[in-house]
């Protein structure tokens, strides 16, 4: 008999090997916010919302007016990497067209 066998009074015992699964958690989500300025044309903002956030013309117009009237507006909610990419795309396009449009992210 080997030293690894476990015995009780009733005979050898057997065990079930349980494989533990690592718990996965949902990634944190981030809001992409657009900030108002007095120089970027409204049509440009609508175009940006349609292009980078896949908004319909009506949705983009509603968001643009919200940003214009309240100073900030929600463009969408994404994982960190996607949110960062969208902010970079918006800022690059605004710079290319010489507009001071600003976007930022905020943890949800």
Image (cartoon, helix red, strand yellow):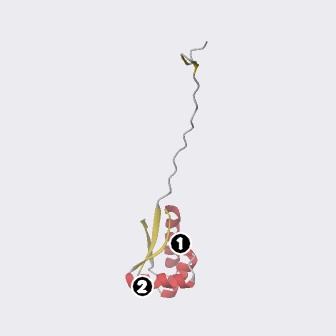
Foreground residue, 89 or 6? 6
Q: Secondary structure at mark 1?
A: helix
Front: mark 1 or 2: 2
Which residue, as the protein is rendered here, is positioned at the far front? 10
Q: Give left or right: position of 45 versus 106.
A: right
Q: Position of residue 77 (x, y in %)?
A: 49, 68
Q: Position of residue 39 (x, y in %)?
A: 43, 86
Q: Give left or right: position of 10 versus 99.
A: right
Q: Residue at 51%, 47% (x, y): give it.
A: 23
The quadrant where residue 12 appears: top right
Residue at the disc numbered 2: 68
User: Dot 1 surroundings within 10 Å: few (below 14), some, or many (20 or more)?
Assistant: some
Which residue, as the protein is rendered here, is positioned at the far left? 70
Q: How far is mark 1 from mark 2, CA to CA?
A: 21 Å
Residue at the disc numbered 1: 89
- Image quarter where the N terminus lies is top right
Foreground residue, 65 or 102? 65
Which residue, as the protein is rendered here, is positioned at the far top? 1
Foreground residue, 105 or 61? 61
Q: Position of residue 58 (x, y in %)?
A: 54, 85
Q: Residue at 52%, 70% (x, y): give it.
A: 86
How many labels sit on residues? 2
Q: Position of residue 71 (x, y in %)?
A: 38, 81
Q: State whether residue 79 is above or below residue 43.
A: above
């Amino acid at each position: 008999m080997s030293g690894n066998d476990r015995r009780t009074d009733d005979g050898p015992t057997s065990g079930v090997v349980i494989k533990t699964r690592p718990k996965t958690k949902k990634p944190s989500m981030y809001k992409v916010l657009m900030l108002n300025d007095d120089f970027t044309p409204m049509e440009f903002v609508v175009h940006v919302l349609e292009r980078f956030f896949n908004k319909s013309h009506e949705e983009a117009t509603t968001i643009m007016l919200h940003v214009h009237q309240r100073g900030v507006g929600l463009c969408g909610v994404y994982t960190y990497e996607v949110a960062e990419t969208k902010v970079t795309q918006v800022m690059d396009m605004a710079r290319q067209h010489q507009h001071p449009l600003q976007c930022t992210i905020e943890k949800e």
